[in-house]
Amino acid sequence: MQFQKYVSTRATPQTQPIPGAGQVMNAAGGYAWAVDNWTRLDRFLVLGTEGGTFYTSERALTVQNAQAVAACIQADGLRTVARIVAISEAGRAPKNDPALFALAMAAALGDPATRRAALTALPQVARTGTHLFHFLGYAEAFRGWGRGLRRAVATWYTDKPAQTLAYQAVKYQQRDGWSHRDALRLAHAQPPTDQHAIIFHWMVKGWADVGAAPHPEAAVRLIWAMERAKRAERVDQVVALIEQYDLPWETVPSQWLGAPEVWQALLPKLPLTALLRNLARMTANGALTAESEALAMVLRKLGDGELLRKARIHPIAVLTAFNTYAAGRGMRGALQWEPIPAVIDALDRAFYAAFGNVEATGKRIVLALDVSGSMSTGMVAGVPGLTPRVAGAAMALVTANVEPQVMTVGFSHTLVPLAIRPGQRLNEVVALTNHLPFGGTDCAKPMLWALEAGVKADAFVVYTDNETWFGQMHPVQALQEYRRKTGIPAKLVVVAMTSGGFTIADPNDAGMLDVVGFDAAAPQVISDFIGAE
Ligand code: CA
């Protein structure tokens, strides 16, 4: 009897678990490891659940992730809150909504110390008026307006200096059915100063009288200027208000937003997020033209890595701006523009700069992109068109641009070497991966291919949804065989491109690491892990 034909820990079909390894069935019917709740929390905070995955609906994926968050809160509420704050504050996630949602859960479901910590952290995670409104919407799904929530929301308003609050008040007036009036009323907030009282009054009732003379209180003058902009009849009046009172672009009445002189006035103080969102508009309306002073300013801002990081610009925000701008036309509506090549180049460079300085390890690295069918479903962080497949290609490019010894391959049930070169533009790489054939998923392929082709690798980095099922051998077994036959203690990094609950990395093997795709910190974490002896 050849028992070994049916049971082996060295080669097990992916549709069966490796004996004794503690694997579970993944959503594709193959076997992998379940990630722990802390990893799931990180995946949720960074990747969100919008659009679901190929195998799991948005609703089911959200419920699963919320269960993991709840389990973390129960296991160690303070650690959960600290994690939410850390990822949100560092700008590591493309969107802040998952952090606000998880914080709302902690503020409702935690023990008393956890609830207190969550509510104390509210201003750190809800940094803008819109964040606050989203948090309130989430919180109401889990709890009522008890004393703790009232006090936390009141503090959000009363702890800010009047001038800061005035800025929040005009910039983010309402969102998703919430306004400052609602929040102030429910929180029973009492103004701590006369200036706050004037702002609260404007939020709740508006001002009856907005005269032509600037408001006597300097701290609230921004509100006055915004009210004057509403009443402006000529563009030069709007421009004067922007220049004198630093009106944010959100407060400029929409009938003036097509005017190039308005944008030229906004540009010096325009925050980077707003700049990224309005590049197309400024090009279409003629505020940005080749060799203009405005263009020089835009290029200077986009080229300032320090500024990008201080503004918490996530690489995905740059990638989105890049895709939109390079297309030359809006997704909706008739807006068209002639993209300025210098802006496209600047966005391309800003994408890498937004990850910070990633150090090269000098190791031999195989970057392996899962291009199977399932990778084309869902939206990373809710960005339309940003499938796990496209996002994986963009992430791989970050490492490819830094490391001197890299090979890039795409795999499904077969493997295709990809002609990715450093310095290549993002859209070229994305187009390259998009044209590959789809197929079943075999995450063991990169290691098996390297063995067969005689490729020497110190590390394999696999960008995948971890839904492997196709191969006759598990990815970890392929890696072990690679290590045995080549004598190279090769490492495996698994970059999760969805917030599903599985990983192909063996949690008991110190040479394997699971990281969250499109965490802005991921490329450096990968580099540290591969570089460590
Ligand atoms: Ca797949």
Image (tube, rainbow, N blue to C red):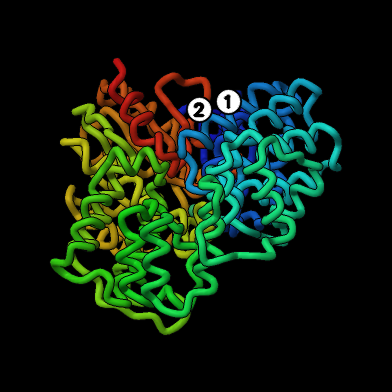
Give the residue type at disc 1: Ala
Q: Secondary structure at mark 1?
A: loop
Q: Secondary structure at mark 2?
A: loop
Residue 412 is situated, as x and y percent measured from the top left of the image, at 41, 53
Identify the disc placed on residue 141: none
Whether residue 32 is visible here, answered yes or no, is no
Q: Are marks 1 and 2 in contact (CB under 8 Å)?
A: yes
Residue 50 is situated, as x and y percent measured from the top left of the image, at 59, 56
Q: Is mark 1 within 8 Å of ligand 1?
A: no
Residue picked out by circle 1: 21
Q: CA distance from mark 1 to mark 2?
A: 8 Å
Residue picked out by circle 2: 506
- Residue lying at the far bottom of the rendered structure: 334
Q: Is residue 392 above or below residue 224?
A: above
Give the residue type at disc 2: Asp
Using the rendered view, name the quadrant where residue 209 is placed. bottom right
- Residue lying at the far left of the rendered structure: 291
Task: Please identify the quadrant where the C terminus is shown.
Answer: top left
Viewer-proximal residue, 9 or 312? 312
Whether residue 82 is visible here, answered yes or no, is yes
Residue 35 is situated, as x and y percent measured from the top left of the image, at 59, 32
Residue depicted at 69% across the width and 61% down the height: 206
